[in-house]
Amino acid sequence: MRRFALLALCALSSLAWGEACVVHSQAERLDVKVCQQNRSIPPNLFRSGFCQPQLKGQKVEVTFVEQCPIGAFGVCRNARVAGTPYQQDIHYYGVASDSAFLKPFCERQSKGVWMAY
C-alpha cells in the first residue's frame, strides 16, 4: 500500500509540474514563436526530439519552461503527433490572422481542438 501511494504521488507531481518548450525561429522576413506543452510524450523524447526542430536557414532558439507563457492568440489542444500515440498542446504567438490556416491544420492534421484567445 505504501508503494502504491508513493507511485501515485510521483505521478501527480509530474502532472502538476508539467513541461513545455518555447521555440522561437527567425529568418529573413520571418519571426515565429510557438510553445509546445507536453501531454503524453516521454520527457527524454520531448526534450531531445520534439523540442529540437531542424529548420534550415533559420535561427532557432529553444527555451524549456514549466508551462507555456500567457499571450498566445490560439492553442491547438491535444494535438496528436503524426505517426505516434503522443499528444501535446501547441500555443501560437504573434499574428492572430495566422489562425486562418492554423485552425484547419490543428483540427484536420493534428486531430486537435482549436481554441482562440
Image (tube, grey):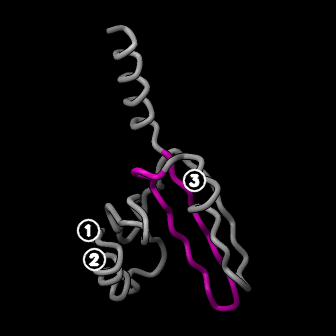
Answer left or right for 33 relative to 27.
left
Q: Main secondary structure of the magenta part?
A: strand
Quadrant of the rendered structure where residue 100 is?
bottom left
**Tag 2–tag 1 contact (CB < 8 Å):** yes
The local secondary structure at tag 1 comes to strand
- Between 20 and 92, the residue placed more toward the observer is 20
Residue type at tag 1: Val
Mark with earlier residue (3, 2): 3
Quadrant of the rendered structure where residue 54 is?
bottom right
Image quadrant in which the C terminus is located: bottom left
Residue type at tag 3: Leu
The residue furthest bottom is 29
Quadrant of the rendered structure where residue 116 is?
bottom left
Q: Where is mark 3, residue-wise?
A: 45
Residue at x-position 35% and y-position 16%: 4
Mark with earlier residue (1, 3): 3
Answer left or right for 77 relative to 21.
left
Residue at x-position 73% and y-position 76%: 59
Residue type at tag 2: Glu
Residue 107 disc label: 2
Can residue 20 be seen here? The reply is yes
Q: Which residues are magenta?
A: 19-41
Question: Which marked residue is nearer to the observer: mark 1 or mark 3?
Answer: 3
Answer left or right for 94 relative to 96.
right
x, y percentage for residue 86?
41, 58
x, y percentage for residue 18?
46, 43
Placement of 42 over or under 58, stated as above or below: above
Placement of 19 over or under 69, stated as above or below: above
In the rendered structure, does residue 108 fall within the stretch colored magenta?
Answer: no
